[in-house]
Image (cartoon, grey):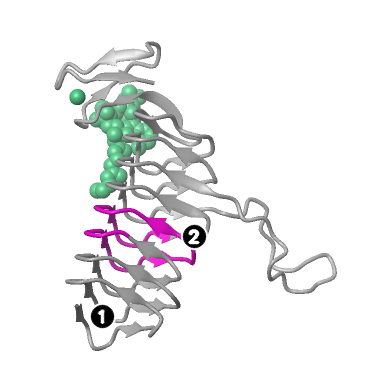
């Protein structure tokens, strides 16, 4: 493990082999970071689990109970809140914000600060999905191999292999395993002209 001297790591954290932790990162509570992960500077991770080979860019915050699979890339300035589960090989762009409380408030009707009187909502990002920079993800399921365009607001579940973008995000086409984009919203089976894979949605 290579840790920058300014990083603060909880003694309850479990850190695998060959992990890099950059400057001013806080690795708090019982975080699990598997082998070969890179956590860049100024990250705040608490009570989450990061799968092997995953890279977390600078200024990322990941809350408790989040699970991130192996071989993911989480780009700088993203916020991943409690209730989010991310599969393997997922790309999260810069400044992606997840939402877990649809009706947030600071105080209750009696003026008392809210602590745990709120409903935690879940989001699942399936394997090999990619989320474009600056997107906001409400509590939904984002399907395998789907691609969300930059700056989208995702308010509904996104099926496997979908290309979706806009505010609110709409399905515009499909994305193959090989990353080829096909602008077809009608057919349920589409053969990728680039790699021959048959996409079923
Ligand atoms: C969504 C995306 C995959 C579309 O790429 P594409 O298929 O090459 O699309 P085009 O650039 O040909 O644009 C097609 C149309 O969609 C619009 N469009 C493209 N991306 C859009 C987006 N993110 N949000 C809203 N509209 C978008 C274009 O304006 C164009 O509209 P028009 O037909 O009215 O002219 C791409 O634009 C994108 O946002 N990728 C994510 C990139 C990213 O965030 N990377 C992160 C790390 S750098
Ligand atoms: Zn293909």
Q: Quadrant of the N terminus?
A: bottom left
Q: Nearer the viewer, residue 19 or 56?
A: 19
Residue 192, above or below 15: above
Q: Which residues are magenta?
A: 51-79
Q: Residue furthest left?
A: 194
Q: In which image quadrant can residue 183 be found? A: top left
Query: Is residue 72 located in the magenta-colored stretch of the structure?
Result: yes
- Sort mark 2 into few (<14), some (14-19) or many (20+) by Cα contacts within 10 Å: many
Q: Residue furthest top?
A: 187
Q: In which image quadrant can residue 14 be found? A: bottom left
Residue 189, above or below 40: above
Residue 72, above or below 76: above
Q: Is residue 163 left or right of residue 55?
A: right
Q: Nearer the viewer, residue 2 or 73?
A: 2
Residue 103 pos. (x, y %): 68, 53
Q: Residue furthest right?
A: 110
Q: For the residue labelled by badge 1, is the local secondary structure a helix, a strand or a loop?
A: loop
The answer to the question of whether label 1 and label 2 lie on touching residues, with beta carbons closer than 8 A, is: no
Residue 55 pos. (x, y %): 24, 61
Q: Earlier in the sequence, mark 1 or mark 2?
A: 1
Measuring 28% from the left and 54% from the top, which residue is drawn there? 70
Quadrant of the displayed image that contains ligand 2:
top left
Is the residue at mark 1 in contact range of ligand 1, meaning its CB lies under 8 Å from it?
no
For label 2, the residue is 81
Measuring 44% from the left and 52% from the top, which residue is drawn there? 85
For label 1, the residue is 23
- Sort mark 1 into few (<14), some (14-19) or many (20+) by Cα contacts within 10 Å: some
Residue 43, above or below 54: below
Residue 53 pos. (x, y %): 21, 59
């Amino acid at each position: 493990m290579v840790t920058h001297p300014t990083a603060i790591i909880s003694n309850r954290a479990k850190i695998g082999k060959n992990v890099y932790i950059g400057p001013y990162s806080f690795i708090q509570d019982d975080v699990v970071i598997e082998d070969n992960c890179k956590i860049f500077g100024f990250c705040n991770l608490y009570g989450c689990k990061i799968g092997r080979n995953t890279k977390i860019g600078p200024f990322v915050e990941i809350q408790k109970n989040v699970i991130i699979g192996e071989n993911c890339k989480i780009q700088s300035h993203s916020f991943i809140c409690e209730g989010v589960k991310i599969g393997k090989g997922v790309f999260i762009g810069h400044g992606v914000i997840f939402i877990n409380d649809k009706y947030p408030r600071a105080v209750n009707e009696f003026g008392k600060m809210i602590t745990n009187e709120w409903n935690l909502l879940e989001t699942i990002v399936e394997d090999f999905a990619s989320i474009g920079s600056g997107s906001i993800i409400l509590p939904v399921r984002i399907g395998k191999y789907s691609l969300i365009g930059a700056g989208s607001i995702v308010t509904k579940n996104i099926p496997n292999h979908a290309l979706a973008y806009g505010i609110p995000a709409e399905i515009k086409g499909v994305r193959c395993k090989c990353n080829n984009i096909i602008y077809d919203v009608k057919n349920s089976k589409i053969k990728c002209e680039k790699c021959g894979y048959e996409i079923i949605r």
